[in-house]
Amino acid sequence: MNAPSALASAYIAFRDDLIDDGLLVPMGSDGLFGRGAVFESIVTALDTAIMTLGADNNPTILRFPPVISRSLIERTDYLKSFPDLLGSVHSFSGSDRDHLALIATAESGGDWAQAFTSTDVVLCPAACYPLYPMSSGQTVPDSGRIYDVVGTCFRREPSIDPARMQSFRQHEQVFIGGESEAMAFRNRWLERGSGLLRQLGLPVEAVIANDPFFGRVGKMLASSQRDQALKWEMVVPICSEEWPTAIASTNAHQDHFGAPFDIRRPNGSAAHSACIGFGLERCTLALLRHHGLDPHLWPSEVRAILWS
Ligand code: ZN
């Protein structure tokens, strides 16, 4: 989507303010940023607030690296839905002679990466993905297994919108278990998630998600997701009232992961799953936008939630 020019100016103005104040550090590719101490202090506080909010579920806490095995992604329908967003890790495994050719190509400004071949790992696109293989081949109770995960995710969508990063962190709570229980989990977290964001002074609204599925196959998947109202986003205006940004989402996956990963319910059918994911950078940017770039000056009730 080409951003209308007023929107583009708003993105650039906010991004430049963030960079000028040292909150973000540009890294030479749109949507790729280092983060300064103040930015990270907000991320850390949010992380703790989200974990505290979900502590009553007594989740299993797990943290994963930013890469996952290629076989994992092959068991999901990510390649069908978002091939354009996936990052695949390639490396060099040539001979000495190939190496010399590689260096010559690089030195002449050519595309040295052509000499790289795919490996057995890809960049993780969603923090909950590494969880599903863990229950593969197992029967889970209908009351479910609940996890708290944080992961670095990659999506190849370079943008001037500072809220659309290529590499970002998601904090998720994930449920794997019965069908009605998964739906109840999603609904409960839609309320809880919106509640936390509202307490943080953000004018959040819940809307049915409109994910950017790829191509013709994707169009069908997108309309089915919308028709069934499976995924909801919590949106907040960051650079535009008209085009608010999704800073968190809750998703009922049905048996979308339970079936391919062979996770079963006690009655033998495929397990259902659901998750809530908070985009930590996006939540941070929403707070900076609505309360100002210096967290010391934020409303005391917001500071009390994050730094009490
Ligand atoms: Zn998820």
Image: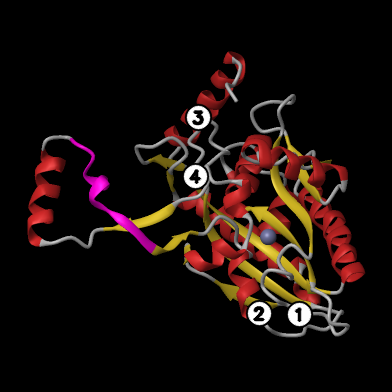
Q: Which residue is mark 4?
A: 166
Question: Residue 18 magenta-drawn?
Answer: no
What amino acid is found at the position of numbered circle 3 in the picture?
Ile
Q: Nearer the viewer, mark 3 or mark 2?
A: 2
Marks 1 & 2, CB-CB < 8 Å contact: no
Regarding residue 308, the answer to whether it shows in the image is no
Q: Is residue 117 left or right of residue 25?
A: left
Q: Is residue 200 above or below residue 275?
A: above
Q: How is the image coloured?
A: secondary structure
Percent x, y for residue 166? Answer: 49, 44
Q: Say which element carries label 3.
A: loop
Q: Which mark is residue 58?
A: 1
Q: Nearer the viewer, mark 4 or mark 2?
A: 2
**Can you say which quadrant of the picture contains the C terminus?**
bottom right
Q: Which residue is mark 2?
A: 136
Percent x, y for residue 136? Answer: 66, 79
Going from N to C along the chain, the mark reached first, 4 or 2, is 2
Percent x, y for residue 262? Answer: 70, 76
What amino acid is found at the position of numbered circle 1 in the picture?
Asn
Going from N to C along the chain, the mark reached first, 3 or 1, is 1
Identified at 48% across, 64% down, the residue is 70
* Badge 1 residue CB within 8 Å of ligand 1: no
Percent x, y for residue 121? Answer: 43, 64
